């Protein structure tokens, strides 16, 4: 069964993670049926600052505005089965943790959790305070997966792209995608 994927791109630094995730999803197009993307306004600003242009517009995914509650994945009946929130600011994490569905990203996360589907949240801020940790705990208790944007080094990455790619490979693994990535002791 091909997946129906939601990518919520939050406004924290870390646009490279979202870009590499979209690049990898393109390579894995035989494993998904639809990819819906929602970007916060700050995500668009950070993308331009960090990536250098508005290259997100070139991806052949379905893009939705942050207040488009007519997007199919604003309802559980559309059966989108996987959602990434990448990167995720602490404000966005807080709104997801408390069920404050005030935009399409938070509404979609709420739908994914209530339908017992896969929500993978990628916090990209540090350090954490107790409020952040409690919010991560709430999302975990609700069935979500917290996967901080913490790269690994045992594959000996040589570039920033390779380093960030270690996080993206882990995200795809957590979502159940078959992908080629470094495997420990293999």
Image: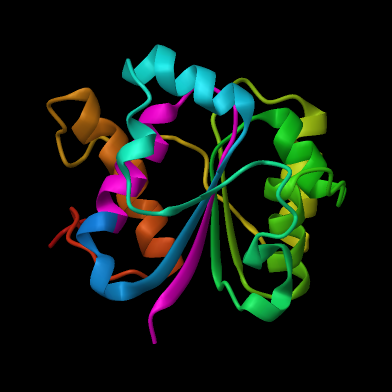
Residue under the image location 77 percent in, 63 percent down = 142
Residue under the image location 61 percent in, 78 percent down = 79
Percent position of residue 125, x then y: 58, 24
Q: In which quarter of the image is the C terminus?
A: bottom left
Residue under the image location 31 percent in, 34 percent down = 164
Between 184 and 122, which is closer to the camera in this rendering?
Answer: 122
Quadrant of the image occupied by residue 130:
top right
Q: Quick check: is 9 in the magenta stretch?
A: yes
User: Start and end of the magenta stretch?
Assistant: 1-25
How has the structure been colored for display?
Answer: rainbow
Residue 173 placement, left or right of 186: right
Percent position of residue 156, x then y: 14, 34
Residue under the image location 59 percent in, 34 percent down = 10
**Vertical side of 73 occupied by 170: above or below:** above
Residue 104 placement, left or right of 149: right
**Vertical side of 92 occupied by 75: above or below:** below
Percent position of residue 90, x then y: 70, 30
Q: Quick check: is 7 in the magenta stretch?
A: yes
Q: In which quarter of the image is the N terminus?
A: bottom left
């Amino acid at each position: 069964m091909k997946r129906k994927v939601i990518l919520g791109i939050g406004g924290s630094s870390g646009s490279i993670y979202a870009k590499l995730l979209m690049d990898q999803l393109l390579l894995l197009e035989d494993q998904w049926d639809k990819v819906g993307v929602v970007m916060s306004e700050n995500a668009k600003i950070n993308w331009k600052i960090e990536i250098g242009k508005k290259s997100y517009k070139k991806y052949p995914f379905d893009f939705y505005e942050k207040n488009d509650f007519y997007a199919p994945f604003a309802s559980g009946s559309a059966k989108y089965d996987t959602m990434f929130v990448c990167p995720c600011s602490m404000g966005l994490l807080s709104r997801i943790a408390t069920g404050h569905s005030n935009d399409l990203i938070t509404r979609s996360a709420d739908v994914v959790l209530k339908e017992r589907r896969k929500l993978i949240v990628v916090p990209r801020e540090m350090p954490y305070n107790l409020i952040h940790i409690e919010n991560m705990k709430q999302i975990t208790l609700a069935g979500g997966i917290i996967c901080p944007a913490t790269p690994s080094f045992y594959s000996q990455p040589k570039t920033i792209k390779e380093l960030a790619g270690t996080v993206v490979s882990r995200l795809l693994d957590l979502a159940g995608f078959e992908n080629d990535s470094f495997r420990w002791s293999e």
